[in-house]
Image (cartoon, rainbow, N blue to C red):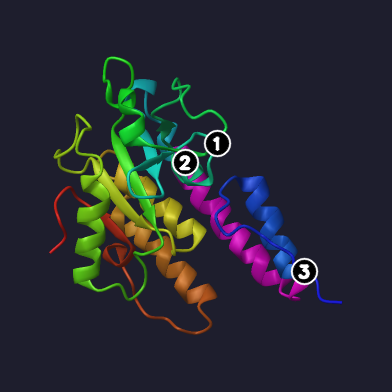
């Protein structure tokens, strides 16, 4: 009898991710490979945690995640968890409008843009459409579409306020690029070259011999204007 075992590819909390990866390693007789992946995740998280811990509380960034056009993910969603482990605080921690939903459509929740109540530094779009091999024209279309949905935000138009990260990138890579995008300008440990190093390690160790050199621009748009 065939059995289906589902392991979410989007989980970010350490315990859940490790359990899922180790289970997959066991099922496919790749325990050592699974352990190496968990080690990469752990080392990436430690670098981020150690770097961000040196900042005073008022210098730690606040951010919200968006996984669908015009939506903000809740604090307990897997998308917001990317930003949590990348060192950010949830920008809508005091907002009660999510209810039991893991996301809200901003046109129906205009109060989230009331800066006297809620203010945050970044909107981070996590999109599977942006991935390996995405054309420049497609990336520009995605960027224009996803960012324009937040034109009511007070920081809309500010350079660097919106970020788009590939949802197709491996978990350690997504988190590394999120940390770089939010903290790279103030924390040298979380530089673009560090994030690219995490990416390259994943390629070298887990892409089955494909040692193609890829960099941040393949999976990250970190600006506030349409990419060229």
Q: CA distance from mark 1 to mark 3?
A: 28 Å
Picture quarter with the C terminus: bottom left
Residue drawn 71% across the image and 54% down it: 19
State whether residue 187 appears in this view: no
Which image quadrant for residue 72?
Answer: top left
Which image quadrant for residue 227?
Answer: bottom left
Q: CA distance from mark 2 to mark 3?
A: 29 Å
Residue drawn 26% across the image and 60% down it: 142
Q: Are marks 2 and 3 in contact (CB under 8 Å)?
A: no
- Give the residue at mark 2: 80
Q: Check disc 1: other Cα within 10 Å, few if <14, some if 14-19, many if 20+.
A: few
- Give the residue at mark 3: 26
Name the outermost residue toward the right: 1
Q: Check disc 2: other Cα within 10 Å, few if <14, some if 14-19, many if 20+.
A: many
Left or right for 90, reference 33: left
Picture quarter with the N terminus: bottom right
Residues rendered magenta in the picture:
27-50
- Give the residue at mark 1: 76
Q: Position of residue 162 (x, y in %)?
A: 25, 44
Q: Is residue 86 above or below residue 228?
A: above
Instruction: Decide which of tag 1 and tag 3 comes sooner along the chain.
Output: 3
Residue drawn 75% across the image and 68% down it: 4
Q: CA distance from mark 2 to mark 1?
A: 7 Å
Instruction: Decide which of tag 2 and tag 3 comes sooner along the chain.
Output: 3
């Amino acid at each position: 009898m065939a059995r289906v075992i589902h392991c979410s590819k989007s989980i970010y909390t350490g315990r859940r991710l490790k359990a899922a990866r180790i289970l997959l390693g066991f099922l496919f007789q790749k325990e050592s490979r699974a352990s190496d992946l968990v080690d990469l995740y752990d080392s990436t998280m430690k670098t981020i945690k150690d770097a961000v811990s040196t900042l005073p509380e008022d210098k730690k960034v606040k951010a919200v995640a968006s996984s669908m056009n015009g939506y903000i993910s809740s604090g307990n969603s897997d998308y917001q968890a990317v930003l949590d482990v990348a060192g950010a605080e949830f920008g809508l921690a005091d907002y009660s409008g999510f209810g039991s939903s893991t996301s809200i459509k901003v046109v129906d929740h205009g109060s989230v843009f009331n800066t006297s109540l809620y203010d945050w530094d970044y909107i981070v779009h996590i999109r599977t459409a942006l991935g390996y091999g995405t054309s420049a024209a497609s990336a520009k279309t995605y960027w224009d579409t996803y960012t324009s949905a937040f034109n009511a935000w007070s920081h809309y138009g500010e350079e660097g306020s919106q970020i788009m990260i590939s949802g197709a990138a491996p978990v350690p890579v997504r988190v590394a690029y999120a940390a770089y995008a939010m903290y790279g300008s103030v924390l040298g440990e979380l530089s673009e070259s560090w994030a690219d190093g995490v990416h390259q390690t994943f390629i070298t160790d887990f892409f089955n011999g494909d040692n193609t050199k890829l960099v941040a621009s393949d999976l990250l748009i970190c600006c506030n204007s349409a990419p060229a």
